[in-house]
Amino acid sequence: SKKRKTYLSKACNILMRHKSTETVCGIVKNIARDGEKMTVLTLQELEKKEVDMFSTVFIGNKDTRVIGGHMVTPRGYRKDI
């Protein structure tokens, strides 16, 4: 919403009090639509971004990594199964 331009920045500031500024985050715009676009960035970079009603924001945890340009969060499954 045009009236809520500061909400993402405020949320990021709250998160950065408890999480690293380097936490892996992502934005996907127009999921499953023409023009779908994915962006992987840090929590600090996310704070400065603008998103719209067609955007979904993902916040990783301390184990989330960027692999092949994608956010990956290991789930701790045993590899020998």
Image (tube, rainbow, N blue to C red):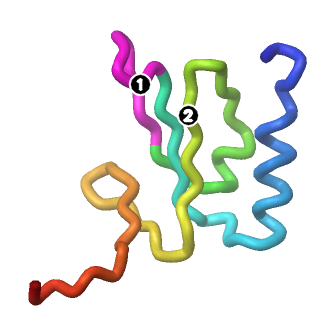
Span shown in magenta: 30-39
Residue 43 quadrant: bottom right
Q: Dividing the image into 4 quarters, which one contains the C terminus?
A: bottom left
- x, y percent for residue 22: 60, 65
- x, y percent for residue 76: 34, 82
* Residue found at the far front of this picture: 81
Please name the residue shown 86% across and 24% down the image: 4
The verdict on residue 58 being magenta is no
What element does badge 1 sit on?
Answer: loop
Please name the residue shown 68% across and 34% down the image: 49
Relative to residue 19, is residue 23 drawn left or right? left
- Label 2 amino acid? Thr
Q: Is residue 49 above or below residue 61?
A: above
- Majority secondary structure in the magenta region: loop
Please name the residue shown 47% across and 75% down the image: 63
Query: Which sits in the foreground, 34 or 76?
Result: 76
Query: Which sits in the foreground, 76 or 39?
Result: 76
Identify the residue under disc 2: 56
Residue 31: mark: 1
Label 1 with label 2: CB-CB less than 8 Å:
yes
In primary-sequence order, the first of circles 1 and 2 is 1
Q: Dividing the image into 4 quarters, which one contains the N terminus?
A: top right
What element does badge 2 sit on?
Answer: strand
Estimate the spatial distance between the alpha carbons at disc 1 and disc 2, rounded to whole Å. Answer: 8 Å
Please name the residue shown 52% across and 38% down the image: 27
Residue 58: mark: none
- x, y percent for residue 75: 36, 74
Residue 16 quadrant: bottom right
Relative to residue 24, is residue 32 drawn left or right? left
- Label 1 amino acid? Ile
